[in-house]
Image: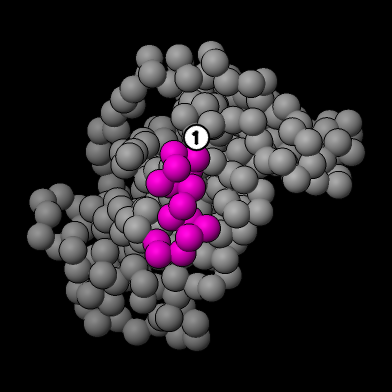
Amino acid sequence: MPEVTRRVMIGGMSAAAAALASAPAAGAAAPAGKGTNLTADQALALLKEGNRRFIADRPASGPMSRARRLAIAKGQQPFAVLISCSDSRVGPEQLFGRGLGELFIVRNAGNTVASTQAMGSVEYAVAELGVPLVVVMGHQRCGAVAAAASVVQQNSVYPGSIGRMVEPIVPAVLAARVKEGDLVDNAVRENVRRVVRDLRTSVEPMLLDPQKAGRLKVVGAYYDLDTGVVDFFDEP
């Protein structure tokens, strides 16, 4: 895959710290079926703090004990949905230092919600589990985005279901062609923006209503494989 180098800035440190300070204890169990007690801002602050610890080689240790497993065995209260790539280098729990029952993860190559399974999973987490935050996270040197770029640039054809898998990413590549810089890197971010926009403007009441009421936020992020930094570059 092409090498991509870029400077990733971490913004809003003080705001995240303030939100983190006011957040309930990480991993605190809410009553079964009631959802997390965290707001979207508090949930986002926990993710940002976990990533800061990760890149400083002081990774947070999310709840992973037998007691935690038993506590959530009959019900889950995740505080965030992570729509991320299947790439083995992009494990959300590791990047954010979270444990059992904290993140509801939807993973596929290219972090899209084009399939019924992916979109249905997000809707379930929001409507049934009361998750207040959805994060769409792309990453540096994404193979699925690179494949979509090859389709656009070289008319590449992929066997089996791979071609259909990258089809939803092609519009992001087409939009990224007019931008300066590396095509794949720009397309990764454009792909995230498109998925975020689709979720923010969904006509489905179970996604639209909680956003209008301020109970749900959808955020776009980019993970830098070289630095370990997650750049939350698209916040509402």
Quadrant of the snapshot with the C terminus: top left
Q: Residue at x 27, y 55 (%)?
A: 190
- Give coordinates of residue 197: x percent, y percent: 32, 56
Q: Residue at x 59, y 30 (%)?
A: 38
Asked whether, in this view, residue 29 is left or right of residue 176, the answer is right
Q: Quadrant of residue 97?
A: top right
Q: Between 143 and 43, which is closer to the camera in this rendering? A: 43
Q: Between 3 and 108, which is closer to the camera in this rendering? A: 108
Residues in magenta, as a range = 202-216
Look at the image and say whether residue 81 sits in the magenta stretch.
no
- Give coordinates of residue 1: x percent, y percent: 35, 58
- The residue beneath circle 1 is 40
Q: Quadrant of residue 188?
A: bottom left
Q: Given the image, on which type of amino acid does mark 1 rest?
A: Ala
**Does residue 219 lie above or below 228 as drawn?**
below
Colour scheme in use: one colour
Look at the image and say whether residue 209 sits in the magenta stretch.
yes
**Does residue 38 lie above or below 128 as drawn?**
above
Residues packed near mark 1 inside 10 Å, few (<14), some (14 to 19) or many (20 plus): many
- Give coordinates of residue 92: x percent, y percent: 56, 43
Q: Between 14 and 202, which is closer to the camera in this rendering? A: 202
Residue 184 appears in the rendering: no
Asked whether, in this view, residue 53 is left or right of residue 184, the answer is right
Q: Residue at x 74, y 33 (%)?
A: 30
Q: Residue at x 46, y 64 (%)?
A: 204
Residue 123 appears in the rendering: yes
